Image (cartoon, rainbow, N blue to C red):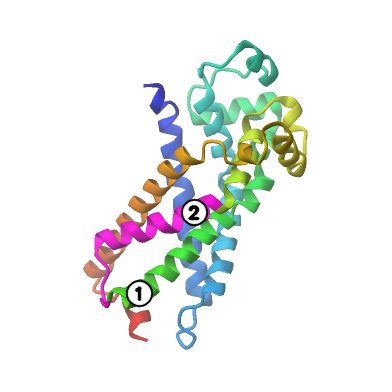
Amino acid sequence: LSLYRGLEPVLTSLCCSNFVYFYAFHGLRTLVKSESTGYNALRDLTVASIAGIINVVLTTPLWVANSRLKMQGAKISTEDRKHLGKHPTYNGILDALIKISATEGWTSLWSSMVPSLILVTNPAIQFTVYESLKTEFPKLIGQQELNALSFFFLGALAKAVSTVITYPLQVIQMKLRYGSETIKKLTMLQIFSYIIRTNGVKGLYKGLEAKLLQTVLTAALMFLCYEKIAAFVFHIMGLSHPLRNARAA
């Protein structure tokens, strides 16, 4: 069961985060889209970045609480526990938000926001790569429509690219969320330097294999479900799918 520690807050955070991001991304993209210019990777990258900033500002407290809940009850050495300090017991994500705010101040809920803001490049790169692949891939395989396996593959590839590029920032982000009090007082660049001094460059990629397995599968399934659900909704509403219109244009 320890493999599923913190599953409930993860699901809550993912639902809120993905809703905010998808809604902001496609809403902003509709506002700036021009039928005459067609697909524009730079435009989508800009829109994805803005959507990511909105998402970070609104949902960072959920991810801070989520990190605490996942680490709660984890078996760590006495020495590490002494350096990390003692956190209260949290009974769910709402209780964690209240207790962190009460004991550490409400600003602690946004303690990792700076690397998180920089990490908007992760979904921005992911969505830009995905949209580019989704536009170009049908030309490569000589088909007008993509099947479920294609959506799964393109989603996985896009997330793998974005994860490898931005993973060091995610390591720093976790240090800020659940590191020692000394680490939390350091700037992002100081933490970056500290990791390299103590663990070498490989320290910036510690746990990358597990992260790739988790995020790539999650993103692949998310994009697959999203495309199928979106197509179904457009169908029952009697509307044409915007992707098909873009290809036709």
Task: Return the x and y of residue 234 as percentages of the image width and height.
Answer: 28, 69
Instruction: Find residue 144 and report its image quarter.
Output: bottom left
Q: Name the residue at the top extreme.
A: 78
Can you name the residue that lies furthest to the bottom here? 36
What is the C-alpha distance between the residues marked 2 and 1? 21 Å
x then y, percent, for residue 179: 66, 28
At a point 48% along the width and 26% down the height, the residue shown is: 92
Q: Residue 174 appears at what percent x and percent y? A: 61, 36
Residue 118: percent from the left, percent from the top?
A: 65, 53
**Left or right relative to 228: residue 25:** right
Q: Nearer the viewer, mark 2 or mark 1?
A: 1
Magenta segment: does it hold 160?
yes
Residue at point 59% right, 14% down? 77
Under mark 2, the amino acid is Val
Instruction: Classify mark 2: helix, strand or loop.
Output: helix
Q: Secondary structure at mark 1?
A: helix
- Residue at image coords 45%, 51%: 18
Query: Is 86 placed above or below 188 here?
Result: above
Horizontal side of residue 138 vs 198, given as left or right: left
The magenta stretch is: 142-164
Q: Which residue is mark 1?
A: 243
- Amino acid type at circle 1 is Leu
Q: Examine the rendered structure and indicate whether residue 115 appears above or below residue 128.
A: above
**Crowdedness of circle 2 by 10 Å Cα count: few (<14), some, many (20+)?**
some
Q: Is residue 197 left or right of residue 218?
A: right
- Of 221 and 235, nearer the camera is 221
Residue 99 magenta-highlighted = no
Magenta stretch, main secondary structure class? helix
Residue pointed to by mark 2: 20
In primary-sequence order, the first of circles 2 and 1 is 2
Q: Quadrant of the C terminus?
A: bottom left
